[in-house]
Image (cartoon, helix red, strand yellow):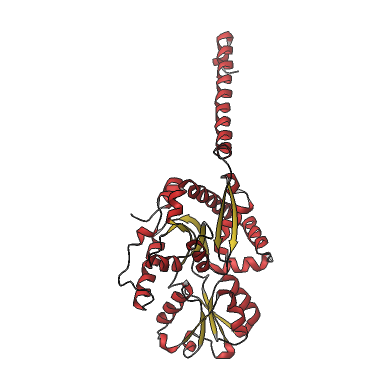
């Protein structure tokens, strides 16, 4: 035995130290339990609705729902899927849902028209979610072959912006192609039926077309010219009325991202189950999309919105003549309160 504990005095010190350790452990356990139960004592369960398009970019949401992270925050979340993010933006604008998930493009467009909408956080980014899929039997093998071709594209989406910069990057004038307006979930039908020669589409629609077309299909990405952001947004009035709900949603999504990073296979399985999809097929799409998950507010978001605003003004897609200050379109307080180092936009 250590000399320090020899004799009655030493024995007394031993038991005193032992008791002190038990007290410290007890206090620690108390605070851990208290923190875990704090949400339950904070009030009744709050019901909210979140809308979004069918995409792997929303994986943090699917994981958070499956693992009960929203319930841990005292939220009862109802998720409403839409064919695309820009339709989800419309649902938020019309008050049909509380929160929405979408790319920066439709949010930028709404803000340009005066809609009082806020981006709360970006939950994922990707270089290769958006792509142009063409048919080789329509004479398309290289980007230059798109000249004179009919290209299906969703108006008002980031797909429209992607098509324009893709053409510019490949030195093709917009006048040299024939854009055909389409709805997102019809991309497969109109390309397979030959109503168009190519379409601009997203991960799941893209994968289905690739599988159907096989060697007759060709896919063009814009890795060096466009990085898509997938964003949580809500109307400003709703956010102002419910700042604590916003923080709870952010905390749940942050846990969802952490789960994806720490338990990737489980997260992929959860996402595959959500879409009722074979895991091998989902993994193929996941890996090909070059996804990066993280609840952030980064300069990438701001730069992308400004680029698209200039594009919209140049193409007379808005009545505005100047690029607005997009800092006014972002709600910083929520993420700053929950995870301040995730906010890297200077404001």
- Figure quadrant of residue 138: bottom right
Instruction: Give the residue furthest to the top.
Output: 8
Image vertical order of residue 197 relative to residue 96, above or below? below
x and y, in percent, of residue 89 in the image: 49, 64
Q: Residue 73: image x %, image y %?
A: 56, 45
252 and 21: which is toward the camera: 252
Residue 108, image quadrant: bottom left
Residue, far left: 322
Q: State the image coordinates of residue 222 (x, y, percent, origin top left).
A: 47, 74
Name the residue rendered at 64%, 55% in the picture: 266
Residue at point 58%, 20% (across, down): 18
Q: Quadrant of residue 185?
A: bottom right
> 136 or 4, which lies in front?
136
**Residue 160 sits above or below residue 175 on the image:** above
Residue 71 visible (yes or no): yes
Q: Which x, y percent locates residue 107?
A: 44, 65
Residue occupying the point 58% across, 19% down: 19
The one nearer the camera, 186 or 258, is 186
- In the displayed structure, 328 sits above or below 248; it is below
Which image quarter holds the N terminus? top right
The total of numbered circles placed on residues is 0
Residue 263 can be seen, yes or no: no
Q: Nearer the viewer, residue 161 or 258?
A: 161
Judge left or right: residue 81 versus residue 121: right
Q: Residue at x 45, y 58 (%)?
A: 235
Quarter occupied by the C terminus? bottom left
């Amino acid at each position: 035995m250590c000399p320090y504990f020899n004799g009655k005095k030493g024995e007394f010190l031993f038991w005193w130290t032992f008791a002190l350790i038990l007290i410290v452990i007890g206090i620690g356990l108390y605070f851990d339990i208290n923190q875990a139960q704090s949400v339950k004592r904070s009030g009744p369960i709050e019901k909210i609705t979140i809308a979004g398009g069918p995409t792997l970019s929303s994986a943090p949401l699917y994981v958070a729902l499956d693992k009960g992270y929203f319930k841990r925050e005292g939220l009862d979340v109802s998720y409403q899927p839409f064919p695309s993010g820009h339709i989800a933006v419309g649902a938020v604008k019309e008050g049909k849902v509380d929160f929405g998930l979408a790319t920066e493009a439709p949010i930028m467009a709404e803000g340009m028209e005066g809609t009082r909408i806020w981006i709360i956080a970006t939950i994922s980014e990707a270089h290769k979610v958006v792509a142009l899929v063409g048919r080789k039997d329509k004479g398309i093998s290289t980007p230059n072959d798109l000249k004179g071709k009919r290209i299906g594209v969703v108006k008002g989406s980031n797909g429209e912006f992607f098509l324009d910069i893709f053409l510019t990057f490949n030195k093709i004038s917009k006048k040299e192609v024939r854009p055909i307006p389409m709805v997102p979930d019809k991309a497969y039908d109109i390309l397979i039926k030959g109503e168009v020669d190519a379409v601009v589409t997203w991960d799941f629609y893209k994968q289905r077309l690739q599988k159907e077309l096989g060697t007759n299909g060709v896919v063009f990405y814009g890795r060096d010219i466009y990085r898509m952001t997938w964003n949580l947004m809500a109307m400003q009035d709703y956010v102002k009325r419910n700042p604590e709900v916003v923080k709870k949603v952010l905390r749940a999504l942050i846990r969802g991202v952490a789960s994806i990073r720490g338990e990737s296979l489980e997260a992929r399985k959860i996402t595959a189950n959500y879409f009722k999809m074979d895991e091998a097929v989902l993994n193929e799409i996941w890996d090909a999309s070059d996804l990066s998950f993280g609840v952030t507010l980064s300069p990438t978001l701001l730069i992308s919105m400004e680029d698209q605003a200039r594009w919209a003004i140049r193409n007379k897609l808005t009545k505005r003549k100047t690029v607005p200050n997009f800092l006014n379109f972002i709600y910083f307080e929520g993420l700053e309160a929950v995870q301040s180092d995730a906010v890297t936009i200077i404001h």
